[in-house]
């Protein structure tokens, strides 16, 4: 069985950094939202949790920026394949559905990228605004706005990320290994990213 | 106060003039607001729109130092519109008394009354007298028509105070004057009461006493004396000013307002003859006729067994003034400045900031050999030698600082403005080396006594013969710890023999039981009854805390104890008609009850209900036993005509020593009060005493005041960071108009200067001051507080006392410095 | 327990600031070094060490020399408190049984969201970044004492009592509607204004910022509905359609 490389070590590392920081942020974020004092068992106190949340945010942001720049060239190229992919519902709507051959990333993945790009940047920027309280004429307005943005972005993410996890695991067995070993069987790749496989010379 | 704090709630109209209760007596506003809730009108007359003015129904702006013009206009208004309370005026005042036909007023004599000697700057009061009948009683015209009766003279005198004239002097618009006059004069009806509240805004003028006299006349005309919600009420500037004045704080009075004798009053007999007024009219109570009892009991209290009939009860031990000697504040510091004092005890005060012309005081202190500063914190006085213009190398004064306790660290009585003596308890032990005042005095006394014992000296008797039974004594005879209760008991007095009124060794019931033969002692007759015995039990009346009221008037007779005799409203016999029925039944202070049951025998014993009356005598209508209401006056009458004062029987408007006008609009020849002592004359004087009136270099009227956030010179409050936070720095309030003229911005630093000194201040550019239209010219006024000093905050950020600007001049009667009206300049710093 | 409240009557306030000092005294708040900037109002604004301040409003008047108003400014103890609503730290801001909005510095995480959530710009942060504001002397009132400011006020301009009783009294005194009577679920500090609130430096209709209400009503529930929904959709998909199979894909 031919194994081909789908993700670099950097990509894997960055993905998990981003994911880990996201989980910390999301869990503590839920804690803040719903006053989950049970989390004190993990963090010790809300004060510590706030610091963890803030610094995890820093890590998340750094990782997010790397992610954004790394996938920028491939993610924002939309073409006929993507439209076709969408029209077929990504092949998820029935067992028999078939999607046309895709390049390195399919339209769903690109969409996810965009959602993460937008909500990630928004949540990071608004988070920093609340945390660092820049010198502006009306800080209260800025904080109110940031609070809104932070929460909208959070809601987007909290919907998108579980779907991403599902699609990358149960829905598509074999996908997860990309983010572990960085490699996939050629056959697996051909089925999902035929054009990419072709482009890189298989 | 004739009335008391709570009584303000009973008023229909409250005139605040010469005071600023919201800022300086905040608690009094509780009662003022209660009155307003019931529909009373609050009138504030002040050069500046104060925090009190902010609560007023009517606010009238008036140039500093023109109160008599303002009030004179009101008298004129009341008389010409027949708004006075006729029954009251005829029966209870001397309005009907016929005055010597030779008496002339300033309208006829170019600004002075008859009898003026311009060399001595004094009046010969011969013509200020009454026409007497064969019994020696003043002749009267109850119709008030005789041209020489006090009423007609009053009318004539104040007819000159027309609205136009008053407005041109005070700068108050005519409509405002009418509004104030009309509102206040509405209390001339039996069922209406008006009260007046004043403080230093009236007393600190060269015409201070006459300011109050003018209001007394108004209150008598309107029948407002003696009634609930009426009276003339001095708001004292400190919690115990009343108490300390009662106990002989001033140089010319012994405790209980007994005069300090001069050297010419050689013995007790002469003293009694000179100071005991006689009344020929049998209806006059003439309470001061009891003077012999009070002075004798006082001597017995202070010299004890050493006061005997043989030695004139130790009268010769009393300090005497030289003939005509005045030891008031300004005179003392003038003498000190001239090097005539060796030492000085500064006790609970900060003259380097509080005194009029404080700059002179600061220099005067440097002429001393030693000074003892008894204080809570170091202050500008204690540290004068290192002050802004002082050179410590050249100053030889040795300064001792004695730390004294706060009120929380000592026990004793405090007498408020309403004459209410309230007992206070010690909360904590004195901190550090501080001692209560009484302990410091105790130490001093025994040390001085020991020195006399060891070294002898001239005239040791006054010290050696003093009684000092204030607690347990050690082997040397020294009191170990002063027991304040023993002091209070001595003030109340004891029976020294078995008498009809009480047994030997027991506390006096009250001053009615005092004797003139040395069989009673009493340290201060007006406080007799404050620490007494009831059913053989000793009772500290001042410590009582009963909350029962009478008639809803807020008299609370069981709460602490007010002098005299727990009487809450003095001259209350004037609150009833001739038959003893209250003028206003809804506000009955006292009421004659012919069917009053005796509490013991249950038999009918006619008497008074309500407040403690001014004597038990039946109402005035009682031909045989009825008495006049004003019992402290020899003639028993309220004084419309008041010959007792130095500067005239009727108040006359004179300009302040420093004013913006070149002449007095009332009488061109006499600009200032003709009887004030001038420290700087045409012949010259000390440069420190210089004054410049109508001088273009100092064109703005200025006044000084306190702020709520600081107390007096601020020694206590500048050390309290919370207070300093609210009022951190000296400021001067100026009108927007003047600020625009001088290019001064709000919040900027300016220099305020007078002929005597200068201070920096932060400008408060505000509508609270407005330019006045005075004699057709625009006059600007500014004002600044006197609560700051260079010594604290230590970085000098607070500024310095505005008393560096005020002049050396005092009232003609009291010598209280005129710090409420003087001239300054204001420039950008 | 009946909800407690303060009624502030600027008509009765004489601007003496006894309340300002009493508050500092009871709460042991240090003073700050201030300068005189041309007004009696000092410190110029609420600080972490100044829970209650008298605002001095000087304005022109047609009938008088000037109009000078004194208004106590402090936490309003809203029933529907924006600060509590937005606060992410449980117990940092809370309602006492008397209805006061209390705070617990130990639990405060210093995020300052309450500053944004407050319609009256009240919460301040101390040097340790902990929330600081008037708490209606919750320690005193829990013991049946009145707040230090009300205790000190000489004129009754700050009156303390049961909220309903206070409203009743004010209505008897002729105040048809108090400021804060119904705003934000009813404030714990109500004002007897004789003029429009604006004159006294107050917002005509104070409200929690709309976005915070939106967040509270929509975004916050959406967070768990969203998470749950995404999980549920995934599960459903897995059960109904199932994963993509690799076999037979040729």
Image: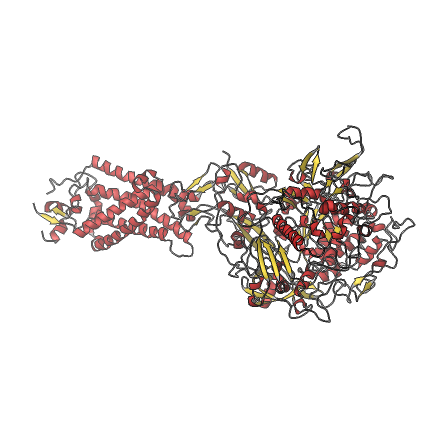
Q: Residue at x 51, y 47 (%)?
A: C25
Q: Would you say residue B63 is visible in this rendering?
A: no
Task: Look at the image and name its color scheme.
Answer: secondary structure
Which residue occupies the foreground of this view, C181 or B721? B721
Which residue occupies the foreground of this view, C186 or B59? B59
Please give left or right for residue B656 compared with residue A16 in the image.
right
Q: Residue furthest top?
A: B602
Residue B411 lies in quadrant: top right
Residue A99 lies in quadrant: top left
- Residue B548's spot in the image, x, y percent? 67, 35
Q: Residue at x 14, y 51 (%)?
A: A196
Please give left or right for residue B168 compared with residue A70 in the image.
right
Which residue occupies the foreground of this view, B380 or B517? B517
- Residue B717's spot in the image, x, y percent? 56, 53
- Residue B369's spot in the image, x, y percent? 62, 62
Q: Residue furthest front?
A: B454
Q: Would you say residue B649 is visible in this rendering?
A: yes
- Residue C117's spot in the image, x, y percent? 42, 46
Please give left or right for residue B284 compared with residue B339 in the image.
right
Please give left or right for residue A69 compared with residue B641 in the image.
left
Which residue occupies the foreground of this view, A22 or C241? A22
Q: How many numbered callouts?
A: 0
Location of the C terminus of chain C (image quadrant): top left
């Amino acid at each position: 069985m031919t194994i081909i490389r789908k993700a670099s070590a950097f990509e894997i590392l960055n993905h998990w950094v981003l994911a880990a920081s996201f989980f910390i942020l999301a869990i503590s974020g839920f804690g803040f939202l719903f006053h989950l004092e049970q989390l004190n068992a993990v963090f010790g106190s809300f004060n510590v949790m706030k610091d963890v949340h803030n610094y995890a945010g820093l890590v998340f942001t750094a990782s997010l920026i790397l992610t954004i720049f790394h996938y920028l060239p491939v993610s924002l190229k939309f073409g006929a394949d993507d439209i076709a992919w969408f029209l077929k519902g990504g092949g998820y709507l029935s067992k028999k559905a078939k999607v046309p051959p895709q390049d390195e990333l399919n339209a769903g993945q690109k969409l996810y990228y965009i959602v993460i790009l937008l909500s990630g940047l928004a949540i990071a920027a608004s988070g920093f605004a609340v945390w660092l309280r820049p010198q502006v004429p009306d800080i209260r307005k800025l904080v109110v706005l940031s609070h809104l943005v932070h929460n909208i972005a959070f809601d987007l993410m909290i919907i998108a990320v579980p779907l991403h996890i599902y699609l990358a695991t149960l829905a598509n067995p074999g996908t997860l290994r990309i983010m572990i070993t960085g490699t996939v069987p050629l056959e697996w790749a051909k089925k999902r990213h035929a054009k990419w496989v072709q482009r890189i010379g298989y | 106060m004739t009335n008391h704090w709570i009584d303000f709630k009973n008023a229909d109209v409250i005139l605040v003039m010469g005071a600023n209760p919201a800022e300086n007596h905040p608690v009094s506003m509780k009662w003022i607001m209660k009155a307003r809730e019931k529909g009373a009108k609050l009138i504030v007359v002040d050069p500046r729109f104060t925090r009190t003015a902010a609560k007023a129904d009517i606010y009238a702006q008036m140039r500093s130092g023109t109160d008599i013009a303002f009030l004179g206009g009101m008298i004129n208004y009341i008389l010409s519109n027949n708004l006075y309370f006729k029954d009251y005026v005829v029966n209870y005042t001397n309005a009907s008394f016929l005055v010597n036909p030779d008496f002339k007023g300033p309208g006829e004599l170019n600004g002075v009354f008859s009898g003026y000697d311009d060399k001595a700057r004094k009046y010969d009061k011969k013509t200020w007298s009454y026409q007497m009948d064969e019994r020696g009683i003043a002749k009267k015209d109850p119709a008030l028509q005789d041209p020489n009766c006090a009423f007609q003279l009053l009318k004539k005198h104040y007819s000159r105070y027309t609205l136009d004239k008053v407005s041109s002097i005070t700068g108050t618009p005519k409509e405002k004057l009418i509004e104030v006059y009309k509102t206040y004069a509405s209390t001339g009806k039996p069922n209406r009461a008006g009260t007046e509240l004043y403080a230093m805004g009236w007393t600190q003028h060269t015409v201070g006493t006459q300011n109050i006299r003018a209001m007394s006349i108004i209150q008598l005309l309107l029948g407002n004396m003696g009634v609930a919600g009426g009276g003339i009420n001095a708001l004292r500037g400190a919690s115990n000013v009343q108490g300390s004045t009662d106990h002989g704080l001033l140089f010319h009075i012994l405790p209980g307002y007994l005069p300090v004798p001069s050297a010419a009053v050689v013995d007790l007999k002469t003293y009694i003859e000179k100071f005991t007024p006689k009344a020929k009219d049998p209806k006059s109570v003439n309470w001061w006729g009891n003077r012999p009892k009070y002075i004798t009991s006082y001597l017995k209290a202070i010299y004890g067994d050493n006061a005997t009939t043989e030695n004139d009860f130790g009268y010769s031990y009393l300090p005497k003034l030289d003939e005509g000697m005045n030891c008031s504040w300004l005179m003392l510091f003038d003498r000190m400045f001239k090097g005539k004092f060796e030492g000085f005890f500064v006790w609970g005060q900060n003259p380097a900031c509080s005194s009029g012309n404080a700059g002179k005081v600061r220099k005067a202190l440097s002429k001393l050999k030693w000074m003892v500063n008894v204080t809570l914190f170091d202050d500008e006085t204690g540290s004068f030698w290192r002050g802004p213009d002082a050179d410590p190398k050249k100053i030889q004064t040795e300064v001792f600082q004695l730390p004294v306790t706060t009120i929380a660290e000592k026990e004793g009585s405090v007498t408020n403005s309403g004459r209410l003596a309230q007992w206070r308890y010690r909360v904590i032990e004195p901190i550090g080396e501080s001692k209560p005042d009484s302990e410091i005095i105790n130490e001093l006394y025994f040390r001085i006594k020991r020195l006399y014992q060891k070294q002898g000296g001239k005239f040791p008797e006054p010290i050696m013969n003093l009684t000092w039974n204030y607690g347990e004594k050690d082997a040397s005879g020294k009191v170990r710890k002063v027991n304040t209760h023993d002091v209070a008991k001595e003030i109340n007095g004891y029976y020294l023999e078995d008498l009809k009124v009480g047994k030997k060794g027991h506390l006096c019931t009250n001053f009615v039981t005092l004797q003139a033969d040395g069989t009673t002692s009493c340290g201060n007759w007006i406080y007799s009854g404050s620490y007494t015995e009831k059913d053989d039990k000793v009772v500290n009346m001042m410590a009582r805390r009963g909350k029962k009221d009478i008639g809803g008037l807020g008299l609370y007779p069981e709460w602490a104890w007010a002098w005299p005799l727990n009487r809450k409203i003095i001259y209350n016999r004037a609150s009833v008609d001739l038959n003893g029925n209250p003028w206003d039944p809804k506000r009955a202070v006292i009421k004659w009850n012919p069917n009053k049951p005796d509490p013991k025998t249950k038999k009918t014993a006619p008497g008074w209900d309500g407040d403690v009356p001014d004597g038990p005598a039946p109402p005035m209508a009682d031909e045989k036993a009825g008495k006049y209401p004003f019992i402290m006056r020899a003639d028993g009458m309220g004084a419309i005509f008041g010959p007792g004062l130095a500067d005239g029987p009727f108040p006359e408007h004179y300009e302040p020593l420093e004013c913006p006008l070149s002449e007095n609009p009332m009488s061109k020849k006499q600009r200032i009060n003709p009887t004030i002592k001038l420290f700087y004359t045409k012949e010259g004087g000390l440069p420190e005493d210089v004054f410049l009136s109508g001088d273009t270099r100092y064109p703005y009227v200025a006044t000084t005041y306190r702020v709520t956030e600081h107390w007096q010179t601020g020694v206590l409050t500048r050390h309290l960071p919370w207070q300093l936070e609210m009022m951190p720095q000296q400021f001067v309030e100026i009108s927007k108009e003047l600020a625009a003229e001088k290019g001064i911005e709000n919040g900027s630093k300016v220099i305020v200067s007078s002929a005597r000194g200068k201070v920096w201040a932060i400008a408060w550019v505000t509508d609270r001051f407005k330019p006045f239209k005075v004699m057709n010219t625009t006059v600007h006024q500014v004002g600044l507080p006197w609560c700051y000093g260079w010594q604290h905050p230590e970085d000098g950020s607070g500024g310095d006392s505005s008393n560096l600007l005020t002049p050396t001049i005092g009232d003609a009667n009291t010598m209280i410095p005129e710090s409420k009206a003087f001239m300054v300049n204001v420039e950008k710093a | 327990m009946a909800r407690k409240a303060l009624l502030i009557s600027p008509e009765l306030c004489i601007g003496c600031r006894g309340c300002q000092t009493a508050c500092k005294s009871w709460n042991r708040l240090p003073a700050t070094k201030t300068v005189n900037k041309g007004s009696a109002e000092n410190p110029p604004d609420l600080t972490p060490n100044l829970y209650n301040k008298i605002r001095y409003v000087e304005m022109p008047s047609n009938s008088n020399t000037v109009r000078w108003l004194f208004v106590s400014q402090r936490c309003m103890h809203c029933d529907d408190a924006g600060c509590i609503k937005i606060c992410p730290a449980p117990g940092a801001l809370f309602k006492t049984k008397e209805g006061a909005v209390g705070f617990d510095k130990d639990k405060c995480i210093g995020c300052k969201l309450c500053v944004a959530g407050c319609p009256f710009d009240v919460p301040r942060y101390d040097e340790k970044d902990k929330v600081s504001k008037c708490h209606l002397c919750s320690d005193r009132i829990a013991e049946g004492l009145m707040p230090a400011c009300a205790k000190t006020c000489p004129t009754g301009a700050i009156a303390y009592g049961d909220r309903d009783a206070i409203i009743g009294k004010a209505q008897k005194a002729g105040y048809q509607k108090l400021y804060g009577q119904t705003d934000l679920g009813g404030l714990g500090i109500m004002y007897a204004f004789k003029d429009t609130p604006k004159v006294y430096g107050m917002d005509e209709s104070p409200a929690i910022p709309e976005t915070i209400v939106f967040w509270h009503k929509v975004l916050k529930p959406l967070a768990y509905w969203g998470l749950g929904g995404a999980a549920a959709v995934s599960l459903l998909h897995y059960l109904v359609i199932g994963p993509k199979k690799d076999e037979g894909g040729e």
